[in-house]
Amino acid sequence: MGRTKVVGIAGRFGARYGSSLRKKWKEVMEKRYSEYTCPYCGKKSVMKRISVGIWQCPKCGAIWAGAAYTPWSEKK
């Protein structure tokens, strides 16, 4: 299992499902599990997704609505 340097989190799929789908899935999951700053307490941590678009800070317990895969909408 030491060959996941390039594919990262998508290495669990091996050669299945096609490279394009694995790359898209990897991008979404890396955004989902990255650290974000809580808008209420200001601490930086991995936010917990309660449901689609519902997020919770593990430090202070604040709950808010955001995007489906990230705590905030990425439209600029």
Image (cartoon, rainbow, N blue to C red):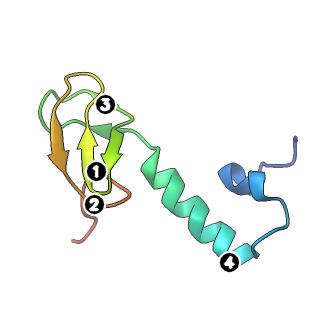
Q: Is residue 60 above or below residue 11?
A: above
The answer to which of marks 4 and 2 sits earlier in the sequence is 4
Quickly name the residue at label 1.
71
Relative horizontal placement of residue 2, taking residue 71 as reference (left or right):
right
What residue lies at 21% left-to-right and 36% top-to-bottom?
38
Q: Is residue 76 above or below residue 14?
A: below
Could you tell me how far apart the alpha carbons at marks 4 and 3 are, in whole angstroms? 31 Å
Quickly name the residue at label 4.
20
Could you tell me how far apart the alpha carbons at marks 4 and 1 are, in whole angstroms? 25 Å
At label 1, which amino acid type do we have?
A: Pro
**Secondary structure found at label 2:** loop
At label 3, which amino acid type do we have?
A: Lys
| Camera-nearest residue between 23 and 64 | 64
Q: Residue furthest left?
A: 40
Do the numbered discs 3 and 1 sit on residues whose CB atoms are within 8 Å?
A: no
Q: Toward which corner of the image does residue 66 lie, by quadrant?
A: bottom left
**Position of residue 28 measured from the top left corner of the image (x, y, whole percent):** 49, 61
The answer to which of marks 4 and 1 sits earlier in the sequence is 4
Q: Which mark is residue 67?
A: 2
**Position of residue 20 measured from the top left corner of the image (x, y, whole percent):** 68, 77
Do the numbered discs 1 and 2 sit on residues whose CB atoms are within 8 Å?
A: yes
What residue lies at 44% left-to-right and 43% top-to-bottom?
34
**Secondary structure found at label 4:** helix
**Secondary structure found at label 1:** loop
Say which of marks 3 and 2 sits in front.
Answer: 2
The answer to which of marks 3 and 2 sits earlier in the sequence is 3
What residue lies at 68% left-to-right and 67% top-to-bottom?
22
Relative horizontal placement of residue 37, taking residue 4 as reference (left or right):
left
Quadrant where the C terminus is found in the figure:
bottom left
Quickly name the residue at label 3.
44
Would you call the spot at circle 4 few (<14 residues within 10 Å), some (14-19), or many (20 or more)?
few
